[in-house]
């Protein structure tokens, strides 16, 4: 693929609320850069309402006259949506309904990600990369990856970047400093309230964050809790789940994965890093090596508190894996 040919970007759940922010950011160049044309391949469920809504989204994209947007395909057929796709952004998932058990949610969504994993493996581009947003994101990603015979497991990533961004802002506010002064705050584990924002390695204006903040109780308590439960707080305040901030985080996730040298939080197959079960997809600090490829940054020391947090979020991931074992 030459650098001026359009990047084929498949987006699922394309009539949903995250996509309604995401597509316009991608088409404006925020994800792949201001010089890189894109071609959209947008997938929705084969029902009249979402398909009609998706037609409306495509009309609005047309009406933006984005110079970088070269084509828009609207479909309910995964084989069309993922055909030759360079990036597959798996946003669509079934929301948890009233009274629904987490195990049922895992299984219902698991079925979606089995199919999508298989079709991506069959028809996506040779260099395809997959980013999963639909919840439970880590486990959905693991299920999709388990279906792939052609594409290696490290092509499948899940998003914990929203959690990193949330943590960065909370640290900046507490330290009454500019957001850009906060660096190296990484998310470990599941995209769920058990996630661990590892504050001990963060820096603020180049100094260790714990020394600058000087409030261990806040870091271990309200900070971790605020980041972990931010999604629920947004729902309580807005009456709908995070959408624009989730779309923004996905822009960050992909942009940083194609920008060598960047270190950022991504849920990837753990392969045992930091004591995670080797088979689960866990949020970890990764360093982008070449565009689309990365290595886990190992060697951050974990104290007793951090080890307990990692053990708890790992236990949840292992439990989720057990609940979908028949799908892997
Ligand atoms: P919406 O319900 O607004 O949109 C989801 C869309 O996906 C719907 O239009 C639905 O028809 C479609 N869909 C369902 N199954 C599909 C399938 N098999 N193929 C194609 N499309 C399908 O949800 P939205 O607010 O956009 O959120 C999407 C997902 O992101 C949810 O699972 C949500 O829980 C998850 N989130 C993940 C976050 C993360 O950080 N990883 C944060 C934000 C968000 O909560």
Image: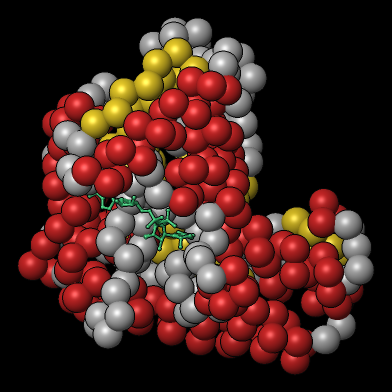
* Residue 266 visible in rendering: no
Q: Which residue: 57% across, 77% down?
A: 236
Quadrant (top left/top right/bottom left/bottom right) for the N terminus: top left
- In the figure, 123 relative to 220: above or below? above
Query: Residue extending furthest bottom?
Result: 217
Q: Residue 107 appears at what percent x and percent y?
A: 17, 68
Position of residue 19 in the picture relative to residue 65 (left or right): left
Q: Nearer the viewer, residue 21 or 177?
A: 21
Q: Residue 273 appears at what percent x and percent y?
A: 43, 63
Q: Residue 279 appears at what percent x and percent y?
A: 27, 63
Position of residue 199 in the picture relative to residue 118 (left or right): right
* Residue 325 visible in rendering: yes
Position of residue 185 in the picture relative to residue 88 (left or right): right
Q: Which residue: 22% across, 43% down?
A: 48
Quadrant (top left/top right/bottom left/bottom right) for the C terminus: bottom left
Position of residue 177 in the picture relative to residue 71 (left or right): right
Query: Residue extending furthest left?
Result: 326
Q: Which residue: 52% across, 82% down?
A: 309
Q: Which residue: 75% across, 63% down?
A: 169
Looking at the rendered structure, the number of numbered marks drawn on it comes to 0
């Amino acid at each position: 693929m030459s650098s001026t040919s359009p990047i084929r970007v498949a987006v699922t759940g394309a009539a949903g609320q995250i996509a309604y922010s995401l597509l316009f950011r991608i088409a404006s160049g925020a994800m792949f850069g201001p010089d890189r044309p894109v071609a959209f391949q947008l997938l929705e469920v084969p029902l009249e309402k979402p398909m009609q809504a998706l037609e409306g989204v495509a009309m609005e994209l047309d009406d933006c006259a984005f110079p970088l947007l070269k084509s828009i395909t609207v479909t309910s057929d995964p084989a069309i949506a993922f055909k030759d796709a360079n990036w597959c952004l798996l946003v669509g998932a079934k929301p948890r309904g009233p009274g629904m058990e987490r195990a049922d949610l895992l299984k219902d969504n698991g079925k979606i990600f089995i199919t999508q994993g298989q079709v991506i493996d069959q028809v996506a581009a040779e260099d395809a990369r997959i980013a999963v947003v639909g919840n439970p994101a880590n486990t959905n990603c693991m299920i999709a990856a388990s279906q792939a015979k052609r594409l290696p497991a490290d092509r499948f990533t899940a998003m914990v970047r929203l959690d990193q961004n949330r943590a960065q802002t909370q640290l900046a506010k507490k330290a009454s400093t500019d957001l850009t002064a906060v660096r190296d705050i990484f998310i470990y584990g599941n995209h769920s309230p058990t996630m661990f924002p590892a504050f001990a390695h963060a820096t603020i204006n180049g100094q260790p964050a714990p020394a600058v903040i000087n409030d261990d109780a806040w870091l271990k308590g309200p900070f971790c809790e605020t980041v972990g439960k931010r999604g629920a707080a947004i729902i309580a305040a807005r009456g709908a789940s995070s959408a624009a901030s989730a779309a923004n985080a996905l822009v960050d996730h992909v942009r940083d994965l194609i920008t060598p040298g960047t270190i950022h939080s991504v849920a990837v197959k753990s392969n045992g890093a930091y004591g995670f079960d080797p088979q689960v997809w866990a949020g970890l600090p990764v360093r982008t090596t070449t565009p689309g490829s990365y290595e886990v940054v190992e060697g951050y020391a974990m104290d007793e508190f951090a080890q307990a947090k990692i053990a708890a979020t790992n236990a949840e991931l292992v439990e989720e894996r057990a609940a979908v074992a028949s799908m892997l």
